[in-house]
Image: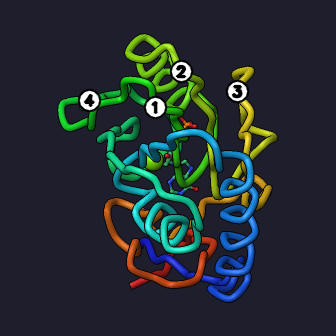
Amino acid sequence: MTPTHSLQILISQQEIQERVSILAQQISQQYQNRPLTLLGVMTGSLFFLTDLMRHLTIPHQVGVIQASSYEGNSTEPGRLRTNLDYLPDLKNRSILLVDDILDTGQTLESIQKEISCLTQQDVAKAVLLWKKSRTQTQIKPDYLGFEIDDKFVVGYGLDYADDYRYLADIHTLQFSRRTP
Ligand code: IMP
Ligand code: MG
């Protein structure tokens, strides 16, 4: 039996772009008098981070945090590894963490704690997708793209075993088995 995947569009690139543009307007209004630094959680937030930046109408800085909580292809959280070595100077900056998807919430909760230890300023969260029914922590996005059902999704930065990040639309990934 050979495992196969099938992809189905869940959120189109047009819907994503419209929503990201609205989020960027809200963020631009709320941070117009504050020095904003976006911190993208890599690698999944790559597209969301850059599209947000393109739509923001206020000056801002950007940095990245490398985080991985999953061992390749599982949906069960593994040990979280974060790398904060390449952060810009966060002194007196308002921080907006940018992540692709809020699932159990462990990743973002842990990163928020680490970043809050480094700055006295506020730390907010912008998340493109939220699998609310799976979230086990108190964490909630301040800016949310879309709430989705408990399905595995890929595209627009999101991966399955490092594949499919390049897709412009967000797809659900179904696992099926085919006889040889
Ligand atoms: P959490 O710590 O359980 O909230 O996991 C968040 C991270 O898991 C995200 O930043 C993604 O990298 C990954 N993840 C969770 N659900 C999915 C999914 O449906 N597709 C791809 N990656 C996912
Ligand atoms: Mg991620």
Pointers 4 and 1 in contact (CB under 8 A)? no
The structure residue drawn at horizontal position 79% and vertical position 56%, both measured from the top left corner, is: 147
Counting residues from the N terminus, which is met first, the one under dot 3 or under dot 1?
Answer: 1
Q: Is residue 8 left or right of residue 18?
A: left
Q: Is residue 119 above or below residue 96?
A: above
Distance from the alpha carbon under mark 3 to that under mark 1: 21 Å
Position of the N terminus, as image quadrant, is bottom left
Pointers 2 and 1 in contact (CB under 8 A)? yes
Label 4: state its secondary structure: loop
Which disc is residue 93 wearing? 1
Q: Is residue 2 visible?
A: no
Q: Residues within 10 Å of mark 4 (few under 14, many from 20)?
A: some
Amino acid type at circle 4 is: Leu
Q: Is residue 116 above or below residue 171?
A: above
User: In this figure, which residue is indicated by the disc labeled 2?
Assistant: 121
Residue closer to the observer: 11 or 39: 39
User: In this figure, which residue is indicated by the disc labeled 4?
Assistant: 84
Residue closer to the observer: 32 or 79: 32
Q: Residues within 10 Å of mark 3 (few under 14, many from 20)?
A: some
Counting residues from the N terminus, which is met first, the one under dot 2 or under dot 1?
Answer: 1
| Residue 24, position as x, y percentages in the image | 66, 63
User: In this figure, which residue is indicated by the disc labeled 3?
Assistant: 139
